[in-house]
């Protein structure tokens, strides 16, 4: 199949593009993953490194992805083939499509849990009183073989439905409604949480670093993978979204805007979750269950708990769907061109495969919890490890090297809208040297953590 075919869809406006990119970035990563990883990695010191990575590595690579996609006007694999025909850079595109399959397969599992909890709150809240009952409820739910798979299927169906409807009518439209709504909701919930007794302790946990944590390599590794995961970076989601943007629009402001808003979302989500965690004396490092075990318990003992729970799980589900959509779009855009199929047929076909791939991750948290794949991790954690800790940073490194070294410099500067400015030169050098080196050093520093 050639690189160019049917006329390509486009965003209706620059704002629509930015909200869609933000919808991709803001997701389970900001709420569910950020809170438990920050909790496990000691809080403030981790957050400090995470923010540093966002500024020095994340923003330059977002710009690199936008520039590639907008210039090539193609999916992630096609973009590299068009800009650097016959060169090995296309590996980043292939890794990207593989990451879309892997991440969405386990993402759909948690997305399904979120929808299940949301519906519980519509029905008056889960029947839990006390931390133990809350944990039992969660364990019973997610270890049941079929039940979570049903909710995962529902999540995937909604996600496929939006991608099926198209770039403008599906993705842009849903994000235009959801994103502003989410911003308002998360601020209201954080405001409420800050009135709880545990607020002071939460602020200390989130903002006053214990610098000794920085001697631990796993903190850097966790912060790097969280930065990539949360910004949807390193696998071409932003190349794909950039490819639907018209050449008239300016890129740099959009890149900074998306990174800033995404980080603010994570911090405000921390302000929403941790005061509650400390008020009810829950260990911040309770792992992936943090949101699902602790929060329903907390909501159960709060005066406005039912409403709080309803809004919270709506927020989580909606944020998960808008990110799931971007994961699916990476694979759909590629296979549509490759197979010459319509968007509708490709969305259903690829969505079904990813749903099936996710089933082992779901079972791995229950019936198959004895199965371990990578370094003693269960199936679910192995998928997350492979994609978020390895594929995304490696993909990001290749993207940085490609824009820095593999592509003609004046063409890059023009395509990025930086032109011959000083900022453009700084950007190029961040991509040439700093970002790849920083990623490499984090990998080397963490070598001991790779126990396969
Ligand atoms: N950024 C999303 C989140 O924080 C997850 C995601 C990761 C989405 C990679 C897209 C992507 O390509 O939940």
Image: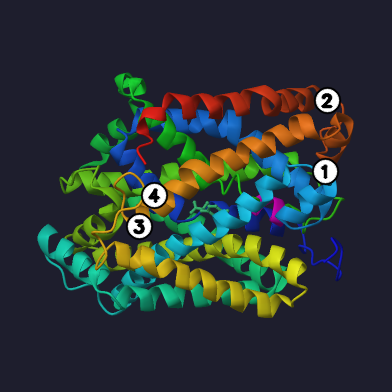
Q: Residues within 10 Å of mark 3 (few under 14, many from 20)?
A: many
Do the CB atoms of the residues marked 2 and 3 lie less than 8 Å apart? no
Q: How many marks?
A: 4
Q: Vertical placement of 357 versus 419: above or below?
A: below
Dot 1 or dot 2, earlier in sequence: 1
Q: Residues within 10 Å of mark 1 (few under 14, many from 20)?
A: some
Mark 1 vs mark 2, CA separation in Å: 25 Å
Which residue appears at 29% of the width and 47% of the height?
376
Mark 1 vs mark 3, CA separation in Å: 36 Å
Q: Which mark is residue 84?
A: 1
Q: Is residue 191 visible?
A: yes
Which residue appears at 29% of the width and 44% of the height?
274
Asked which colour scheme the image uses, the reply is rainbow
Q: Is residue 211 left or right of residue 91?
A: left
Do the CB atoms of the residues marked 1 and 2 lie less than 8 Å apart? no
Element assignment for label 1: loop
Dot 3 or dot 4, earlier in sequence: 4
Q: Closer to the camera, 265 or 112?
A: 112
* Magenta span: 237-241
Q: Which residue is mark 3?
A: 379
Element assignment for label 4: helix
Q: Which residue is mark 4?
A: 33
* Nearest-to-viewer mark from 2 and 3: 3
> Ligand 1: does it lie within 8 Å of the C-beta at label 4?
yes
Predominant secondary structure, magenta span = helix
Q: Position of residue 326 (x, y in %)?
A: 60, 60
């Amino acid at each position: 199949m050639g690189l160019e075919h049917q006329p390509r869809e486009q965003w209706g406006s620059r704002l629509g593009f930015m909200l869609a990119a933000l919808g991709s970035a803001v997701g389970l990563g900001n709420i569910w993953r950020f809170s438990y990883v920050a909790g496990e990695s000691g809080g403030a010191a981790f957050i400090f490194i995470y923010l540093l990575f966002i500024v020095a590595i994340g923003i330059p690579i977002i710009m690199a992805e936008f520039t590639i996609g907008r210039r090539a006007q193609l999916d992630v694999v096609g973009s590299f083939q068009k800009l650097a025909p016959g060169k090995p850079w296309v590996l980043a595109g292939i890794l990207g499509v593989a990451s879309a399959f892997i991440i969405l397969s386990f993402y759909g599992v948690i997305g399904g849990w979120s929808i299940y909890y949301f519906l519980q709150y519509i029905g008056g809240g889960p029947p839990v009183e006390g931390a133990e009952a809350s944990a039992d409820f969660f364990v019973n739910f997610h270890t049941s073989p079929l039940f979570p798979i049903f909710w995962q299927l529902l999540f995937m169906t909604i996600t496929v439905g939006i991608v099926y409807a198209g770039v403008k009518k599906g993705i842009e439209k849903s994000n235009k409604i959801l994103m502003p709504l989410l911003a308002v909701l998360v601020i209201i919930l954080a405001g409420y949480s800050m009135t709880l007794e545990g607020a002071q302790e939460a602020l200390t946990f989130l903002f006053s670093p214990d610098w000794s944590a920085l001697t631990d390599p796993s903190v850097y590794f966790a912060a790097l993978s969280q930065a990539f995961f949360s910004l949807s970076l390193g696998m071409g989601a932003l190349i794909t979204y950039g490819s639907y943007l018209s050449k008239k629009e300016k890129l740099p402001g959009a890149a900074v805007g998306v990174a800033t808003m995404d980080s603010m979302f994570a911090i405000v989500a921390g302000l929403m979750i941790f005061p509650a965690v400390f008020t009810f004396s829950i260990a911040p490092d309770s792992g992936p269950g943090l949101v699902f075990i602790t929060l329903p318990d907390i909501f159960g003992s709060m005066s406005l708990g039912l409403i709080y729970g309803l809004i919270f799980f709506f927020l989580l589900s909606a944020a998960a769907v808008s990110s799931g959509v971007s994961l699916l779009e990476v694979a759909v855009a590629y296979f549509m061109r490759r197979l010459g199929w319509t968007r509708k047929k490709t969305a259903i076909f690829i969505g079904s495969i990813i749903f099936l791939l996710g089933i082992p991750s779901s079972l791995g948290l229950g019936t198959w919890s004895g199965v371990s794949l990578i370094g003693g991790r269960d199936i679910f954690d192995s998928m997350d490890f492979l994609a978020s800790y390895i594929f995304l940073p490696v993909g990001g490194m290749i993207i940085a090297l490609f824009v820095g070294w593999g592509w003609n410099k004046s063409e890059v500067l023009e395509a990025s809208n930086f032109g011959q400015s000083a900022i453009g030169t700084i950007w190029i050098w961040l991509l040439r040297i700093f970002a790849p080196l920083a990623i490499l050093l984090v990998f080397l520093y963490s070598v001991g953590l790779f126990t396969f």
